[in-house]
Amino acid sequence: MSDTNLSVVLHKKGDLRLEDRPIPEPKEGEVQLSMRKVGICGSDVKYWTAGGIGHFVVTHPMLLGHECSGVVSKVGKGVTHLKPGDRVAIEPHDICRKCEFCKSGSYNLCKDVFFLATPPDNGALARYHTHAADFVFKLPDNVSFEEGACVEPLSVGLHGCRRAGVTLGSRVLVCGAGPIGLCAMLSAKALGAAAVCMTDIDSKRLEFAKKCGATHTLVVTRDDQPEDVAVKVASLIGSAPQHTVECSGAQFSVNLGVHATRSGGTMVVIGHGPDNVSFPVASVITREITLKGSFRYMNTWPTCLEMISHGKIDVKPLITHMFSLEETLKAFETAKSGEGVKVIIDCEKKG
């Protein structure tokens, strides 16, 4: 196989291939990127193992990868804020810029959105990729490509915490200690939370979360009742949390979030679990809990990069495994196994 633009292409469920594709040229308003680091997201693994997520189904060959950093290699017509050689992080979508959501700033809700590695849209796990220039952000000199790739999951956590209203002195519950839960915890602490309790069924994940900065952790079991765990959470952090960020999508965690959140507080659901999840609606009503969804992110890249650059958030501990582009299948097997937290692929051609 030649290696002009080695790319990772998912053809169908379980059929992941390395293929050489033409190098894309930037159109007006775009930049061409020599990709450096791309993180593997749980959605990438899900598309590979299941062939789809909800109504997003792989029906044609599709490149994976949307947690990205790279170097600008060419600029298209009209691009003035970037130049070849710039080190950048990539916000992985493009939008219509015309609808009410885009114009109001809630562009994550745009219905005419292009999103990397979400059927039918190709991702960026390749040597080269072209992208809308206004969703490409320069990396500060002291921020690595690896950290740049982590801005995407960090943005999910930050957007969820913003939706929840986390602020100085908040007590926060984060359900689920996977990569998104960890990023929500890091974001909550950076926003000034006084206490962040994380729950999970995996004690090793929680040990890792404690090392990364969680002030409290609590292992839940299949025999636990959400109401009982809610009492334990309040006891651990001194009172019921004003803000809950649910990052697993599991039925138990959704119920726990409702029971644990302080009356008058806010619960945000980030986790994508089953299409239909029940929750104790009477508790939501009688205790006036605000229940919100959180979808992707908006206007988070500049904030995340500044927080990383100035040492307010440290994502480096999340990076547990690194593989070359040629080792992509091994990287996906590692991500699937759950033995790592954030698995990153180095897309740069060596030699």
Image (tube, rainbow, N blue to C red):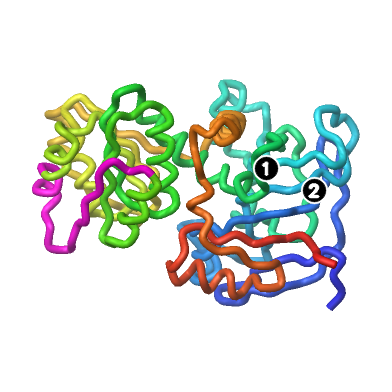
* Residue 306 place in picture, x, y as percent: 59, 30
Name the quarter where the C terminus is drawn. bottom right
* Residue 86 place in picture, x, y as percent: 80, 39
**Residue under the point 77% across and 72% down:** 19
Q: Are marks 2 and 1 in contact (CB under 8 Å)?
A: yes
> Is residue 111 in view from this perspective?
yes
**Residue under the point 38% across and 47% down:** 181
Front-lying residue, 80 or 311: 311
Q: Secondary structure at mark 2?
A: strand
Q: Which residues are magenta?
A: 213-231
* Residue pointed to by mark 1: 90
**Residue under the point 26% across and 60% down:** 201
> Is residue 135 in view from this perspective?
no
Q: Is residue 12 magenta?
A: no
* Horizontal side of residue 174 vs 182, given as left or right: left
Label drawn at residue 33: 2
Front-lying residue, 124 or 187: 187
Q: Residues within 10 Å of mark 2 (few under 14, many from 20)?
A: many
Label drawn at residue 293: none
* Residue 345 place in picture, x, y as percent: 64, 62
Front-lying residue, 315 or 71: 315
* Residue 217 place in picture, x, y as percent: 25, 48
Q: Secondary structure at mark 1?
A: strand
Q: Is residue 227 magenta?
A: yes
What is the three-letter code of the residue carrying label 1?
A: Ile
